[in-house]
């Protein structure tokens, strides 16, 4: 797992109750490889024709999801004192259970006056909370235990906030948020179908073009044109940025704006 330093509780815009937790994300490989392992553990199934809440709904509770209370050292200058803390960890199935604070993953170390620390990767996550955040973490764990939760990446789960790994409570999601998730998923599925129809990915593979990322988006509100964010492997030879289908076809022929001038 990799620690994050920007986790934040999601609060209902019209109430004081929590809707969920954005565990945050850093610019690192662990946070850029998706969450297929986490979804598999919670029974979240992939189906391009399923949108919104059902696309991310928790359908089972993994045996290796562990919640507990313990005592951890207080911050400086009271490090010899102990304070209450709660943890929620989706650990390796073969890993030993948490016995005391010394057996917590090192990625869940709290610093200074922090009251929450999170870490995650493609298959695991961990949350450590103190103070008022303990009760919030209990609520989140209860929602997961009752399968009243969704797990996903991105702003779809919290359109008024940044991207990150998000665990949200279904019964507390505002109706507008649920509707926005559904529509964004539907639009994205339509986008993927449009990309497939261009044949551009197969065209680039046939030409031997390699890239770290080729991310599509609609170029207009009418959804007639597609733009791609290209991150090519050979950055010394090729430009990165936004390009259309014709630009990419020219790239396959070593022409056009993607090819750097020599």
Image: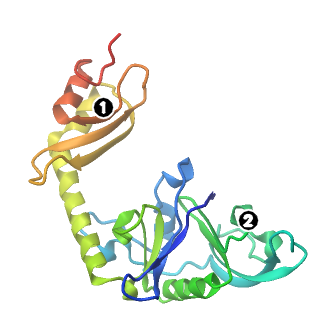
Find residue 122 and name its label.
none
Nearer to us in this view, 107 or 94? 107
Residue for point 13% across, 44% down: 225
- Res 107 → quadrant: bottom right
Q: Position of residue 233 (x, y in %)?
A: 43, 29
Which mark sits nearer the N-terminus, 2 or 1?
A: 2
Q: Quadrant of the N terminus?
A: bottom right
Residue 184 shows in this picture: yes
- Res 117 → quadrant: bottom right
Residue 51 shows in this picture: no
Mark 1 lies on residue: 205
Nearer to us in this view, 111 or 181? 111
Find residue 111 and name its label.
2
Q: How far apart are marks 2 and 1 (CA)?
A: 47 Å
Classify mark 1: helix, strand or loop: helix
Pointer 2: residues within 10 angstroms few (<14), some, or many (20+)?
few
- Res 112 → quadrant: bottom right
On screen, residue 38 versus residue 221, left or right, reads: right
On screen, residue 96 versus residue 25, left or right, reads: right
Q: Position of residue 31 (x, y in %)?
A: 52, 54
Question: Can you say whether 131 is above or below 187 in the image?
Answer: below
Nearer to us in this view, 82 or 254? 82
Question: Can you say whether 212 is above or below 76 in the image?
Answer: above
Nearer to us in this view, 62 or 249? 249
């Amino acid at each position: 797992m990799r620690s994050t330093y920007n986790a934040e509780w999601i609060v209902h815009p019209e109430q004081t109750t929590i809707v969920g937790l954005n565990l945050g994300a850093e610019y690192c490989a662990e946070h850029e490889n998706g969450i297929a392992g986490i979804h598999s553990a919670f029974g979240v199934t992939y189906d391009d024709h399923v949108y919104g809440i059902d696309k991310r709904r928790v359908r089972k509770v993994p045996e290796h999801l562990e919640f507990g209370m313990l005592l951890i050292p207080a911050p400086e200058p009271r490090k010899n004192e102990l304070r209450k803390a709660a943890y929620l960890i989706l650990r390796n199935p073969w890993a030993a259970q948490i016995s005391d604070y010394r057996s917590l993953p090192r990625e869940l170390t709290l610093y200074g006056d922090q009251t929450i620390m999170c870490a995650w990767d493609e298959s695991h996550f961990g949350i450590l909370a103190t103070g008022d955040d303990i009760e919030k973490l209990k609520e989140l764990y209860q929602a997961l235990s009752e399968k009243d939760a969704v797990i996903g990446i991105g702003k779809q789960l919290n359109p008024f906030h940044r991207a990150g790994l998000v665990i949200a409570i279904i019964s507390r999601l505002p109706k507008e948020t649920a509707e926005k998730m559904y529509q964004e998923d539907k639009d994205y599925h339509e986008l993927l179908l449009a990309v497939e129809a261009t044949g551009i990915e197969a065209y680039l593979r046939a030409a031997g073009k390699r890239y770290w990322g080729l991310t599509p988006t609609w170029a207009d509100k009418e959804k007639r044109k597609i733009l791609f964010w290209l991150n090519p492997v050979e950055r010394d030879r090729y430009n990165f940025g936004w390009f259309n289908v014709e630009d990419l076809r020219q790239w396959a022929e070593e022409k056009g704006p993607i090819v750097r001038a020599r």
